[in-house]
Image (cartoon, rainbow, N blue to C red):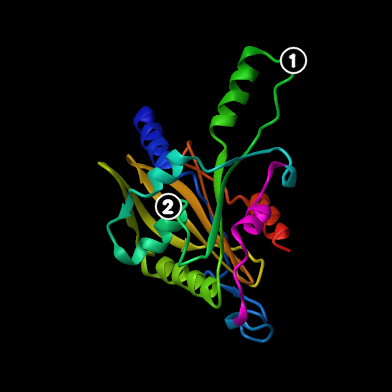
Amino acid sequence: MRRTTVRRTAVAASALSLALLTGACGSGETKTDDAKGGKGDAAATKAVSQTDLDKLVLAESDLKDHKIVNASKADIAAAKVVTTDKAECKPLVDAMALRPLGRPAATSMRKVMAVPPKPAKDASPEEKMKAGLGALGGTITSDTLGSYDGKGATEALAGLRAAGEACADGFSVIVGKDKTKYTKVAPATYTAGDEAVAFTLTADLEGMTGTAHLVAVQKGGTLASFYAQSLTGKAEQPKAVIDAQVAKLG
């Protein structure tokens, strides 16, 4: 049973390109004056170029003790075949699968994983094994940035929020012949940027319960979405990763 669970989780992790998101209280929403229209003009927002967006996405120099890599061609190819059994849940699956939300003019994607401390040189075989297992069981986060013209970022975030509410009772992610059922989508808490949405997703992994996290943060015309999961099936909200990315957006 344990081997089967790890296999299925690994398949889901690979197919979904190991992604994560940001959240807010209550309805999964927070707003600032900008989001309410008190400041700025969303209609006048212009998307940044691909080159500039690539400079805004996380790099290893931005976050200590984390490994950050580009999304591979295999990740992107796998993301294209991920579907769901409920059309209204598509924005959730897009965020989970390293696919941009809405219609951005440019996108940039990274995968992030915390690097656990190395065991001491004189560590016992048991301690070294434990350290190795800890590395395999760490939370893996996908970080997807999208840059939008006009109200594109606001509309994309609203679409994600609506999907989370519509799919509160669950949905399935389908990758070829493999199907992973998420039994619950619950509002979570994360506050940053102009507006943020966060959810905790509960998965049925061969009879065992898994936990993943989805967070999205809008800052001006940029939307950062994060999806976090773990091969153990129990992920933590990657607050350090989200905080670092939001800070880099300025």
Q: Is residue 188 above or below residue 41?
A: above
Q: Where is the N terminus found, in terms of image quarters?
A: top left
Comparing 150 with 179, the one in front is: 150
Comparing 231 with 177, the one in front is: 177
Q: Which mark is residue 38?
A: none
The residue indicated by pointer 1 is: 121
Disc 1 to disc 2, how far (Cα)? 39 Å
Q: Is residue 51 above or below residue 129?
A: below
How many numbered circles does the render carry? 2
Q: Is residue 209 visible?
A: no
For label 1, the crowd category at 10 Å Cα-Cα, with few meaning under 14, some 14 to 19 and many 20 or more, is few
Quadrant hosting residue 250: bottom right
Magenta-colored stretch includes residue 54: yes
**Amino acid type at image mark 2:** Thr
The span shown in magenta is 44-60
The residue indicated by pointer 2 is: 202
